[in-house]
Image: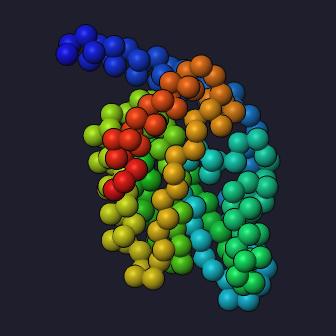
Amino acid sequence: GRMQGLIRVAARSVMTAWHAVQTQSPPPRPEDAPQAHGTGPDPDRILIIGNGPAVGWGVRSHELALPGQLARELTRFTRRGVDVDLVLSPTNASVARLVMAVRPWRYDAVVVISGTDEAVRLVSPTAWRKTMSLLVEAFQRDSSTSTQIVVGGLSPIRSIPIFDSVLGSIADVHATMEKAAGVGNV
């Protein structure tokens, strides 16, 4: 009861401090415009919104990061053009607040990649589930009926270079427990 609550608060405090230190001098990330394009007729418009793997840690261009990879693969697959926009946001709650600002009705598909911050900060399953539900509901409400909404699964936290440590393992275990509790199933 009470002792578990104190341990959880202490663990969250440690993880929050660790997150702050790790993000002070992160590895390189893209510095160019947060967009990528695949050349071809009748381009599809794709929005990637979120954090974690969407950031592009370790590369200096969005063409080398997720937007560029997605644009190339979709163009190759569909033989049509693709315009990919990227909007980064650290938490599920902040993604949900951005929905109206990004005007999701303009896109053929929205790809949400989120949850890294929640895993690292050991956010409770209840709070995580609530913000994920609000995020998905906001996109469903503010997208056109033809917009496809894709919610990506949470990548292993240690796959992100700045979080590849023993404390990253704690965040990985927490994320796995959250998935088992149905957080990703909204």
Q: Position of residue 67 (x, y in %)?
A: 69, 61
Instruction: Name which residue lies at 71% across and 42% down.
Output: 57
Instruction: Name which residue lies at 79% across and 79% down.
Output: 39
Q: Position of residue 47 (x, y in %)?
A: 57, 67
Q: Viewer-proximal residue, 20 or 184?
A: 184
Residue 89 visible, this orientation: no
Asked if residue 79 is positioned above or below residue 73 in the image, the reply reads below
Asked if residue 171 is positioned above or below residue 148 in the image, the reply reads above
Q: Quadrant of residue 186?
A: bottom left
Asked if residue 171 is positioned above or below residue 35 in the image, the reply reads above
Q: Position of residue 105 (x, y in %)?
A: 45, 77
Instruction: Name which residue lies at 47% across and 44% down.
Output: 115
Q: Residue furthest top?
A: 3
Instruction: Name which residue lies at 69% across and 33% down.
Output: 161
Q: Quadrant of the N terminus?
A: top left
Residue 76 visible, this orientation: yes
* Relative to 97, 29 lies left or right: right
Q: Quadrant of residue 43?
A: bottom right
